[in-house]
Each structure stands twice: as C-alpha cells, then as structure tokens.
C-alpha cells in the first residue's frame, strides 16, 4: 500500500513559514538580496518538477479516457463538461461586472501606468479562424514540445478514439498508455511530499518581492477582484457542487485543499493539474475515467477566476480613463472576458495578456493594462485558486450527473 499524502498540517506550516518569511524578506531588502535568489531558485525547481509531469500526464490521461470509454458516453461526457465550463465561466464574468458596477473602483482613481511588456504592446487579438486552426496541431511533436495544451488535448483525444475503434488490436498501446499514466502519478506523489517546502518558498518569493506601497491606490480595485473571487469561490461554486454534485462544501474544501494551495503558490492551473487530478480521485472519489477526461481540459479552458478578473479589470480601466461603457458594451465585455479566460493558458499572468482581447473589443486603450500591472501577481494567485476549484467542482458534478460506471 502506498503511503498517504503529506499531512495538511505540514502544508499549513509551509504557508505560515512562507508568509512570515516573505514579510521578513521584504523588510530586509526583498528582491535585491542573495537569500531572495536562493528562495526563487527553490520555488522554480518545485514548479518545474510539477510541470515536468504535465505533458505525459495529460496525453496519457486523455488517450486512456478516450480509448476506454464507449464513444457515445464520451460524447455525452464531453458535452456536459463543456456546458458546465462555459456556464460557470460566464457566470463568473457576470458576477465581476455586477461587482465592478456596484463598487466603481476606477472612478476618480489617480494612477500611474507602468510600462507595458512588449508582448502586450505588439499583441494582436486572434481571429476566430486562427483559434480554430490552432486547435489541430500540424505536428504533434512540436505541440508537445511547446506545451500547447489545446493542441495536445485534441491530438490525444483523436488518438484515444482511434485506439478505441481498433479494439483488441491496440492492446499493447493501451497498456503502455496506462503505464505512463501510473508512472506520472508516482512522480506526482513524490513531488507532493515537497509541497510544504514548495509552498513556503513560493509564498516567500511572492511576498518578499511585492512592493506593498503599490497596493494603496489600487486597493479598491483589488478589493473588487478579491471580493468577487470570494463570492464565486466560497458561495457560487460550493453551492453548485453541493446541489449538482451532492458533496457538501466542508467536504469539498477539505478534499481539494492541497490543490487549492498548490494553485495559490504556483499561480498556474497547468502546474497544479497533477495535484488536482490526484486530489479529486483520492479525496473526492471521482472515478479515474472522469478526472482523466475533465481535469486536463478544465485546467486548459475552464478559468472562472480569470473571467471574473478580466471583467472587473476592463471596467476598472474604463472608469479610470473616464470612459462610460453602455449596457451593450458591457455585454460585449461579458462575452470577450469569457473568451479571453478560455483562451488564457494555465500559466502565471496569462490572463493579463489575453486582456487585450477584452479591451480591444470595446475600444479601451491597451495602456490601461499598465495601471493594473503592479498588483497582477498577487491577484493571479487568487484567481488561479478559483480556476482550479472550478475544475475540481466540475469533476465532482460530472461524477454525480453521469454516474459511476
Ligand atoms: N494564472 C492563471 C492560471 O493558471 C491564468 C491567469 O493568468 O488568469 O489559471
């Protein structure tokens, strides 16, 4: 019998150490110190260990899900998953709009814009044709090497269905994929033993380099985003999981705590994916054939926290520039924020880059992104947490709806 997860107590010790250590590091010089370099290096190593297993895990998960399930059942699973992801994401964006209209965080704000990264200045929003074209990899090896998750997902699903239709002739490859999946999970288990240390280092790095002085002028904006995330993450999602998934909130949160903490400290749904998968299977009894299918897809396209943040940020920027957005323009923001969240990769700050789509859709100045850049790192931690919570919630709900086989 394999040993159980690292106890949550140690993870809490890691969080506390990270917070106290980060505040101390910040006070003694932050990013300019030698210690900061060591802490940052340690944090990077932890994230890299997680990311190392993501590609094999996603490929093996999706191939084995598609190869092992009745194709009609797979279609039903896919349809329900996508409906859940889209509905909850658009709900989050709507919630963001309601909150930003109530709080008006940008009205009268006196802000200094930061210099925009070159990637944002030069970014062109993709056309619909581009999005479609990018779904299919012309060269799967290239897609794997670039970790292009959408392309990896479609490739793996196609291969999985082909294996499925080959039946007994594909026994060896099925077995191989299954073993790759198990092997990846063994590595995930090892990495999880490092979770308390990883969390401590990553939090220490984030807090250690945060310039708290930049928070003051953006406090209301941060409050709007964090408040919205709290409502969505602590009320809306747990309620849905309770009503549609049959799992009460306390059990749900206890079950996904490791994944949430990993999301908070890594700011990456993709890096958290292996932990999410393991926790929903082990702690929330989601059967493997469901988690293998919906968690990789969720970590790539389902981003409730990001959608909410994009909606709040876009309106905040409009308010700060004194631009009034009409109701119809806000509806455009609702949809583009949802699309921007779906299109954002599960990596740190991805949402900041896809914000270009939202701003351009209603003619807001891209320089507006410079206004919110300073606090993005911190908001990213919390929106990633909600993104991952949405993925786990989807797995629980799906289990309840389609039933256990
Ligand atoms: N960091 C987020 C994630 O990985 C994406 C974002 O920037 O909003 O889920």
Image (cartoon, grey):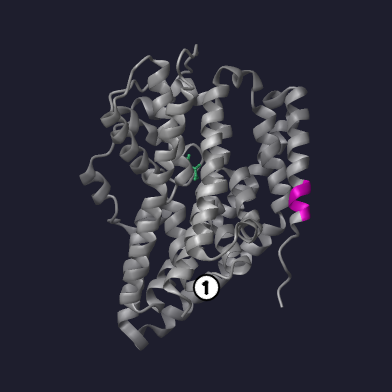
Residue at image position (61%, 44%) is: 264
The N terminus lies in quadrant: bottom right
Tell how many labels.
1
Is residue 361 visible in the rendered image? The answer is no
Majority secondary structure of magenta residues: helix
Please state which of residues 152 and 172 is positioned toward the viewer in this rendering: 152
277 lies above or below 212: below
* Residue at the image point whose x is 35% and y is 57% from the top: 83
For residue 203, what is the image quadrant? top right
Q: Secondary structure at mark 1?
A: loop
- Where is residue 273? Give x, y as percent: 53, 56
Residue at 23 percent across and 40 percent down: it is 127
282 shown above or below 20? below
Q: Is residue 221 left or right of residue 128?
A: right
Residue sticking out furthest to the left = 129
- In this orientation, which residue lies closer to the viewer: 108 or 207? 108
Q: Quadrant of residue 65?
A: bottom left
Location of residue 278 in the rendering, given as x and y in whole percent from the top left corner: 59, 64
Classed neighbour count for the residue bearing mark 1: other residues with Cα under 10 Å, few (<14), some (14–19), many (≥20): some
Q: Taking the image as drawn, is residue 349 in sight? A: yes
Does the stretch in magenta take in 389?
Answer: no
Please determine whether, in this image, residue 34 is positioned above or below residue 46: above
- Label 1 C-beta lies within 8 Å of the nearest ligand 1 atom: no
List x then y, in percent, for residue 255.
63, 61
* Magenta segment: 9-13
The residue nearer to you, when weighing 364 against 200, is 364
Reading the image, the residue beneath label 1 is: 287
The answer to which image quadrant residue 107 occupies is top left
């Amino acid at each position: 019998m394999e040993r159980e997860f690292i106890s949550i107590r140690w993870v809490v010790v890691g969080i506390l150490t990270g917070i106290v250590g980060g505040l101390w590091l910040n006070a003694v010089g932050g990013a300019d110190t030698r210690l900061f370099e060591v802490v940052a290096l340690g944090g990077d190593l932890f994230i890299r260990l997680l990311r190392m297993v993501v590609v094999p895990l996603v490929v093996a998960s999706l191939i084995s899900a598609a190869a092992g399930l009745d194709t009609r059942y797979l279609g039903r699973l896919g349809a329900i998953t996508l409906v859940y992801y889209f509905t909850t994401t658009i709900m989050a964006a709507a919630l963001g709009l309601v909150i930003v209209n109530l709080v008006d965080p940008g009205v009268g704000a006196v802000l200094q814009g930061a210099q925009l990264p070159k990637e944002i200045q030069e970014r062109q929003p993709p056309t619909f044709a581009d999005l479609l074209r990018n779904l299919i990899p012309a060269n799967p090896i290239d897609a794997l090497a670039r970790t292009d998750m959408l392309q990896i997902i479609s490739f793996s699903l196609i291969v999985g269905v082909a294996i499925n239709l080959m039946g007994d002739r594909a026994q060896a490859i099925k077995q191989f994929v299954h073993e790759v999946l198990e092997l990846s999970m063994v590595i995930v288990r090892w990495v999880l033993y490092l979770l308390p240390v990883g969390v401590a280092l990553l939090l220490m790095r984030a807090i250690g380099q945060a310039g708290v002085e930049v928070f003051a002028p953006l406090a209301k904006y941060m409050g709007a985003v964090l408040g919205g995330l709290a409502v969505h993450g602590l009320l809306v999602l747990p309620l849905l999981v309770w009503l549609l998934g049959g799992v009460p909130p306390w059990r749900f949160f206890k079950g996904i705590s490791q994944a949430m903490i990993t999301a908070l400290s890594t700011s990456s749904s993709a890096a958290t994916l292996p932990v999410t998968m393991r926790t929903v299977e082990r702690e929330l009894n989601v059967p493997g054939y469901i988690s293998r299918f919906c968690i990789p897809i969720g970590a790539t396209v389902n981003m409730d926290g990001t959608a909410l943040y994009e909606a709040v940020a876009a309106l905040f920027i409009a308010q700060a520039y004194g631009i009034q957005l009409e109701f119809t323009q806000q509806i455009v923001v609702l949809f583009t924020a949802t699309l921007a969240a779906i299109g954002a990769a599960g990596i740190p700050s991805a949402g900041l880059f896809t914000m270009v789509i939202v701003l351009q859709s209603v003619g807001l100045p891209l320089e507006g992104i410079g206004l919110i850049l300073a606090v993005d790192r911190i908001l990213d931690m919390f929106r990633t947490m909600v993104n991952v919570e949405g993925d786990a919630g989807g797995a629980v709900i799906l289990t309840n709806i389609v039933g256990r086989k």
